[in-house]
Amino acid sequence: MVSQGGALEAASSTALISTDPPYYDNIGYSDLSDFFYVWLRRTLRDIYPDLLGTMLVPKAEELVANPYRHGGKEGAKDFFEDGFRKVFARARQSALPDFPITVYYAFKQSESSEAGETSTGWETLLEGMIRSGWSITATWPVRSELSNRMIASDTNALASSIVLALRPRPDDAPTTDRAGFIAALQAELPDALRKLQQGGIAPVDLPQAAIGPGMAVFSRYAKVVEASGQPMSVHSALARINEILDQVLNEQEGDFDATTRFALAWYRQHGYTTGQFGDADNLARARNTSVAAMDRDEILTSRAGKVALVRPADTDAGYDVTTDEHTSAWEVLHHVIRSVQSETEGVGPAGELLARAAARPNGPVDPDLVKELAFLLFSIAEKNGWTADALAFNTIATSWPDVTAAARSVPARSEPVQGVFDFSEEE
Ligand SMILES: C[S@@+](CC[C@H](N)C(=O)[O-])C[C@H]1O[C@@H](n2cnc3c(N)ncnc32)[C@H](O)[C@@H]1O
């Protein structure tokens, strides 16, 4: 059944809610509608007398922040936020326990804070939903609206919309303190993030997607009490979630081999530019490896006291991962990137390389770890403003399903294969 009505009435019914609510003063829907409405009314009033009964479209109930209607900017903001909270509080009263409700939120680039992921409007809306008795259990970035916005922008572009999944928080939900909240984040976020990384999420969207599991922890409590006795704000909770996200990404470094850990540390300081041999030597020794060995392995170049990591494009196209005595997640990732970017190769040979790396008799390389490395490198490149690098790491992570599909079609054998390749699965 289709029926038209105000949000407050609709929220009172037992319908399952999926809503794309207005956002402050983004669009003056009703004023815009009048432009068309007056003509529609003339032609269709006899057919839809109920819909077209009024001279103009309804204005008073419209949930937008309109300074002309609500006594200035402050009044408009209060009207919008109040109305928003009322709708979610009403919906909470008639919530279905077995189903989440979904809320679409159009994220505007311009409202990103310095941290890149939050905005005050966004925080106010999250706060409104949580205070109305909802738990936010997921935040999922979606590429919606105009796709050219994404293509035109660089890697800092976030997905244009976010879907929030909300479930009713039980009335007897527990309270915790700051330490309890942080401990719960530390216990739950690593696993949740790994699942996001192994799933289809792009590195550029990870911080947004990570808000979901973080907010799920925060909003499961009736209240998180700060040392001051005040309830923790969404703003503060988001800051903690971002800290733990960084911490988890850094801790993932511990999973890698010595060469990769060296290269990550060096990359963080120098990218692919040169640094002093002495610094590289210290870093390498601390990780039980040596500059000379990594020079031989073509991870880096060490010439006349200067050291630089080898860029993916400069790695050797004839590289054979099966016969290489010593390889690393770093080396495999760089060769996979070169292969995908190369005009003569592509995902087929890249997948083959990945499959052969995983099947190495002396020291296999786990493809999941290679993908994790791409996420980690993306976050380092992005924080440093190395846009071209960030783009390359984001692209390889989003191409991963194609590369692994190609890897799966490689026959399992340990001797070098360089034969005909079956591309049929990718078509
Ligand atoms: C972000 S838009 C939804 C756009 C829609 N998803 C689409 O793609 O066309 C928000 C909508 O909420 C409507 N709206 C504003 N206040 C409302 C209220 N109190 N009750 C119901 N709808 C309202 C606006 O008229 C507008 O159409």
Image (spheres, rainbow, N blue to C red):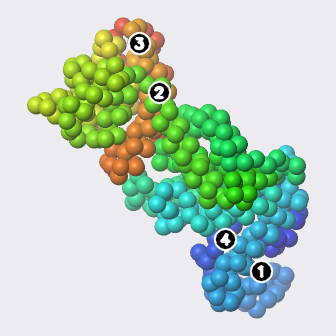
Q: Are marks 2 and 3 in contact (CB under 8 Å)?
A: no
* C-alpha span from label 1 to label 4: 12 Å
Quadrant of the image containing the N terminus: bottom right
Q: Position of residue 255 (x, y in %)?
A: 48, 25
Q: Tell me which amino acid carries mark 1.
A: Glu
Drawn side of residue 359 relative to residue 75, left or right: left
Q: Position of residue 3 (x, y in %)?
A: 83, 68
Report which residue position mark 4 lands on: 22
Residue 250 visible (yes or no): yes
State which mark lies toward you, 1 or 3.
3
Q: Tell me which amino acid carries mark 4.
A: Pro
- Residue at figure coordinates x 77%, y 61% from the top left: 131
Q: Are marks 4 and 2 in contact (CB under 8 Å)?
A: no
Q: Tell me which amino acid carries mark 2.
A: Gly
Name the element at disc 2. helix
Question: Quick one: label 2 or label 3, which is nearer the N terminus?
Answer: 2
Name the element at disc 3. loop
Which quarter of the picture shows residue 407?
A: top left
